Image (cartoon, helix red, strand yellow):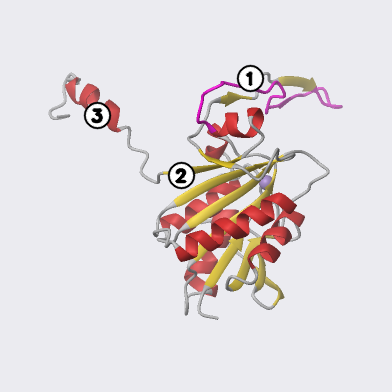
Amino acid sequence: MSIRILVSNDDGAQAPGLQALVEAVSDLGEVWVVAPESEQSASSHSLSLHRPLRIRKLKPNFFAVDGTPADCVHLAVNHLMKDKKPSLVLSGINHGPNLADDIFYSGTVAAAREGALLGFPAIAFSLAARSPWDFAAGAKFARSLAQAALHMKLPGRALLNVNIPGQPKDLGYEITQLGRHSYGSEVVEKTDPRGRRYYWIGGSDYDFEPIEGSDCMAIHTHQRISVTPLRLDLTGVDHLPMLRSWQLEGFAGGA
Ligand code: MN
C-alpha cells in the first residue's frame, strides 16, 4: 500500500482505545503503531533526552517504547519509518476527555502535536467518558475523519483535536474552538505512616463555561463529537502592541 499511517497514544501499547483506532483505520493504509510501554497520561510533550530509549517489537509494524508519547512519534518518524514517512499521524483513542486547557497536559494531544511539528498532518482522538469504555462511535468517526484527511489532503503541520462523547446523541459533530473548564483547585494534604506530609493534586470539582461553539459545549451540552483545529504557533499576536509600548528601564529596544 502506498499510504502509511502512524498511530500512537498515551495510555500504552496495550490500551483498548489504541486497538480500536488501529482497527478502524487498518484498511486506509499500512498502519504502523509506536506507542508507550506503560501509561503516560498527562505527560504532555516531554522528550526523554537524558536517558536511553528501548524499542520492543510486539508484532509486524507494532512497537512499544519505554518513553513518552512524543518520544514514540519522534522515534517512529526519524528512525523506524525513516525510509518512508507517514501520510498521517493519529493518536488515541484516549481513555478520557481532552477538552479546553487539557491540551496543555495531554500526552494524547502531544503525540499528535509532535507529528505536526515534524511536518505531518495529525489528529488526536479522545473518548470523553469514564469506564466502561465503548470506543465504537469514536472508532467509526476516526475512520471517517482519517479518510477525509487523506483524500482532502489535510496539510502538514495541521493538528486536529477530536473528542467523542460517551453517549453520542446522534452521529453529529461540531467544528469547535477550545472551551474553558476547571477541575477545581483543591490540594489534598495527608500524612504518611512516617509522619511526613504528602499532597495530591488534580481536582475533582469539574465545571465548564457555557461558551457557544466550544468543545466543552459540544461534548457536555449537545453530546456531540467536537473537532477543534489547533495552532502550533502560540504567539500572543493580540498582545504584541501592548508589550512593544513598554519601555523597560535600563534596556534599549523592545519595539
Ligand atoms: Mn491517556
Label 3: how many Cα within 10 Å (few below 14, some 14–19, many 20+)? few
Q: Earlier in the sequence, mark 2 or mark 3?
A: 2
The image's mark for residue 185 is 1
Residue drawn at (48%, 60%) of the image? 149
- Which kind of residue does numbered mark 3 sit on? Leu
Rendering quarter of residue 183: top right
Instruction: Identify the magenta region.
Output: 191-214
Amino acid of disc 1: Ser
Q: Which residue is mark 2?
A: 229
The first of marks 1 and 2 along the sequence is 1
- Secondary structure of the residue carrying tag 2 is strand
| Distance (Cα) linking label 1 and label 3 | 31 Å
Give the image quarter of residue 29.
bottom right
Distance, label 2 to label 3, CA atoms, is 23 Å
Report whether 155 appears left or right of 132. left
* Residue corresponding to mark 3: 240
Q: Is mark 1 within 8 Å of ligand 1?
A: no
